[in-house]
Amino acid sequence: MEQVDKLIELSYALDTFYFLISGAFVMWMAAGFAMLEAGLVRAKNTTEILTKNVALFAIACTMYMLCGYNFMYPAEAVNSIWPGMSFLLGEDHTAADVLKSNGDTYYSTMADFFFQVVFVATAMSIVSGAVAERMKLWAFLVFSVVMTGFIYPIQGYWKWGAGFLDQLGFLDFAGSGVVHLCGATAALAGVILLGARKGKYGPNGEIHPIPGCNMPLATLGMFILWLGWFGFNGGSELKISDIGEANAVALVFVNTNAAAAGGVISALFTAHLLFGKADLSMTLNGALAGLVAITAEPLTPTPLLAAVIGVIAGIIVVFSIIGLDKLKIDDPVGAISVHGVVGIWGLLAVCFSNPDATIVAQLIGIATIFGFVFVASLISWFVIKAVMGIRVTEEEEYAGVDYSECGMEAYPEFTNSGK
Amino acid sequence: MEQVDKLIELSYALDTFYFLISGAFVMWMAAGFAMLEAGLVRAKNTTEILTKNVALFAIACTMYMLCGYNFMYPAEAVNSIWPGMSFLLGEDHTAADVLKSNGDTYYSTMADFFFQVVFVATAMSIVSGAVAERMKLWAFLVFSVVMTGFIYPIQGYWKWGAGFLDQLGFLDFAGSGVVHLCGATAALAGVILLGARKGKYGPNGEIHPIPGCNMPLATLGMFILWLGWFGFNGGSELKISDIGEANAVALVFVNTNAAAAGGVISALFTAHLLFGKADLSMTLNGALAGLVAITAEPLTPTPLLAAVIGVIAGIIVVFSIIGLDKLKIDDPVGAISVHGVVGIWGLLAVCFSNPDATIVAQLIGIATIFGFVFVASLISWFVIKAVMGIRVTEEEEYAGVDYSECGMEAYPEFTNSGK
Amino acid sequence: MEQVDKLIELSYALDTFYFLISGAFVMWMAAGFAMLEAGLVRAKNTTEILTKNVALFAIACTMYMLCGYNFMYPAEAVNSIWPGMSFLLGEDHTAADVLKSNGDTYYSTMADFFFQVVFVATAMSIVSGAVAERMKLWAFLVFSVVMTGFIYPIQGYWKWGAGFLDQLGFLDFAGSGVVHLCGATAALAGVILLGARKGKYGPNGEIHPIPGCNMPLATLGMFILWLGWFGFNGGSELKISDIGEANAVALVFVNTNAAAAGGVISALFTAHLLFGKADLSMTLNGALAGLVAITAEPLTPTPLLAAVIGVIAGIIVVFSIIGLDKLKIDDPVGAISVHGVVGIWGLLAVCFSNPDATIVAQLIGIATIFGFVFVASLISWFVIKAVMGIRVTEEEEYAGVDYSECGMEAYPEFTNSGK
């Protein structure tokens, strides 16, 4: 009898540990977004984007602790649309309860919170890149309070909190929709209200590329994200402590890696065909596109199919970035394409390998997340704009937001441009 | 019977694995300190600070293997103040001994050594930032031999080796005192003997800010440290293999994260109130302050209290950095404030949540660590100064220590200043 | 009965998890090589080396999935030299099979693939540094297809796939030969065909040092590799789920760390004795040399012997780098010395601690890997050269390969040299 209990205890410990390590990998993605975005903006806007990334992570962790987690995973939901409101984290499971459940309760609530909280931060990090180089710092931070405390958790509840999207059969394993499309949609709403950077689009429809100032940093950011994604997707299996679950987590790792690799290769080739050069920023976005696409379903494809899903994602992302630029939707890092457009592709691609998926349910999920997040974000951005303004002045933008917002340069000894 | 043994074996394996992964995360903090410090100094002193950080890690690992580990965790201590002397690592537990202990011996000695050795390196890394831009490389390395082989292990023995501070009831879960205050105190002694950088303080009491040359690097360093801290604090629970321990480790992760987030938010606000700008370096130090503060007791607070402890730490660190500058204690990266002043705050804050803590025992611990490390370090620095000198010449300092100490520039193609 | 099964399941889950985390650490080494190499080349060649590193990782993952894994670990080998050909990954173990094996089948095949695939990428990453700053991007990528799909797996089969080198008693725990010597040998063949960078060697035999443009990046790369190596060597024990195995993994961690530390210290001293300066790039290569040297046998030495093996590696690498330069073998990052020359040292050093090793078997292994990889690579490079050329034009090299190959600068706002 005692040995049965000890087995349950060990199993609980292993699953909790697996959760915590997965969460730590996802937390590391915050550094990835910070480096990616800092590498892809101009030197004069670097301190500010770093500050945003650090601050949004802190805000996300705090808001999700204060209310977001309870909204997304309510103890007792009001109904399948409205989770009800409760605040602060409760107690963890007691050993007695775990043993009484005979192992059905198989990991720590605090570990679950830790894993979930770093997901919120990921969604919010997506926004910061798209609005870079012209949005006011404090306006952005106010939005991040709304997004991480309310918008993200409510739509998250609809799927992962067992709300109506889940009941409808919408499938989203690790968040191509709940996290990536959500973040990209909030970014799109912000970008539309904010407008393009000065000088990005000429009066006669010309598009002026604005190169990022530090490509090694952007590459480092991409590698950090790739690494972190093993926690993101691998941890989303939620359990590893038996043979079937361990095999599942292993397959998720392999498929996540295969899709990213596929995205790199196809984006590199596509850019080469279009531009005649091996475009590094497109290649980096290809990797991220592969990762976003496989996130909706990294478990049911074979590795070869996962690679193909990534290959298609890498092609989509190149054309999407070009297309958004034609529409004058100015997204300095390509976040809307990588996380939004490719997120939709990932959600649709679930139908290729998971027999439980239906195209209708996937489309309803996409429309719901996009519609809700877009409207809620647009209202939030609009109110923030009315109250405090969301865009820096033209002079501040020209001088770089590092001066006006942070009062310090990122590279005071290196640059002699942009001042 | 055999199944009981197999359970003990699995449990031992899980705890050992948890220890090793935690240790690897802490080892990663060495990169964090290197990047943080390289980002916050001027370009002309970057190669040298990188060399110091790489070399100190190597020296710490070697000295702790040769003698430090045995001083800190003696097989048979002479008394509660003097651990006695022995050298080199012994054999690991045999399977037979572990099974005979019925699981009381629950993890590998080598894993314990690995976890402990990266802590020593952390303590030493704290020093390198504070003495940056003017200390001789080899003087620093000689001090690191003394610090990691002797000073750190002896005071570490008093608490974690079950010496007199432990017997007095001094509480320090993961080392706000044993690691952070210890490192900051050694740094303070060095800075006092060394003096400020040329040009930092004007003849009429003006303070000239010397901005760091690479803020993305400093931000990366902060994120690396934040990630590594999950190993630092999470691993210090020392066991994860049952429900209670797994919950404890999970709570430590959540609280560590909450405190860091709190520190970011409060330092950002405090700096904004004081300077009118969102100061990135203060924000980074706010995160680290939150992490240092929660390190003394990450297990007994609720997440909300952990966040509050971090919030207060973030305020303290801003005022401490300003205050030390007024005292003309020149610490280029703020290490004495972050690890020392906030380390003390963390040790005192244990009393808010842990009923076993007493303010008297905490104060005795603080005074003992500070007093011993300060005197021992001052003597060591003094002897090193007498024998080989600790400060580069004024010409070398003006030209940058990279030339005089390392013979190479960190950014040969980027800078046109400082030469 | 059921409890026995549950024990096997838990054990399988722990070993699989250990494998996946180890693999994730090794995957992270891809970022390490990218940063190390980007830091050690000139600014004008940085985008291209980053693109190479990202693309080669993707190609390695794809080719190894398509055929390499099956060549290296064939289900049924034709004979001990030729593994036969089969394609794509098969199914993972079923729970029933694992239970029937009574735990002899103890981890997921997919986890094994994931761990192995990141090793291939490591071998290929070694090549990119040595041929930096003058090789055509697409020529390099074509070679990486051949290397990761065929050359690496075939020689890998001879040792780790139980081929003839394994049967001869050749010992190589984690790949000083199979991975590091293999990569360095392929690099050597490429460098010989490619020739030195313009301006590196003067007409009268002078050697002109070409300093790397970003030493913090190179240092970061080294730290990433050091961290990743805990997965590389630690994971190569292949099992952690009992007391003996857990102790073994822990010892591997400690020895890996001790050897790296030893390499740092000796390279720092050696460079100081030779040049009078604390040379950071030699120190970084010293760390990597220690790591490469201990990789052939991190389990049987004591930590002190591991440190000594690292110390000797750190001395060897300095003299090897100087020596190769005298031979006009131009290797911008020292990869051939670090991974090749020191890899041989590591393979020979196995004889000091492992009683099963024989100097004859080690020499046969070294000669076989070197001979096969050199010939196969030389032929491959030669064919690629004949078909598409392997070297950029002199004008392109002078302008920097970033323009000609990638069409974008790595640091567009920072540099005013090298154009």
Image (cartoon, coloured by chain):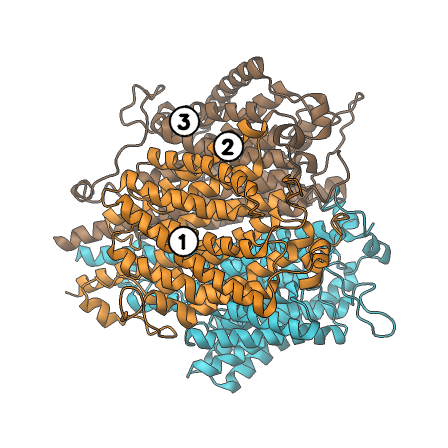
Chain colours: A cyan, B brown, C orange
Q: Position of residue A341 (x, y in %)?
A: 62, 75
Position of C14 with respect to B349 (left or right) is: left
> In the structure shown, which secondary structural element does the residue marked by tag 1 occupy?
helix
Choose mark 1 or mark 2, whichever is in front: 1
> Looking at the image, which residue sits at the far front?
C204
Q: Is residue B45 visible?
A: yes
Up the image or down, C76 lies above or below A106; here it is below
Residue that label 1 marks: C370
Which chain's residue wears label 2?
A: B
Q: Nearer the viewer, residue A183 or C359?
A: C359
Q: Which mark is residue B56?
A: 2
Q: At numbered mark 3, what does the secondary structure look like: helix, strand or loop?
A: helix
- Badge 1: chain ID: C
Residue at numbered disc 3: B153
**Closest to the observer: C69 or C3?**
C69
**Distance in Å between CA atoms under marks 1 and 3:** 46 Å
Amino acid at pointer 3: Pro
Discs 1, 3: same chain: no
Q: Position of residue A342 (x, y in %)?
A: 59, 74
Q: Point out residue C242 in the picture as x, y percentages from the top left corner.
A: 24, 51
Could you tell me if the residues under marks 1 and 3 are in contact, i.e. CB atoms within 8 Å? no
Between residues B403 and B398, which one lies in front from this camera angle? B403
What type is the residue that disc 2 sits on? Answer: Leu
In depth, the one of C193 and C130 nearer the eye is C193
| Circle 2: element type | helix
Q: Distance of mark 3 from mark 2, alpha carbons?
A: 16 Å
Left or right: C274, with B40 as reference point:
left
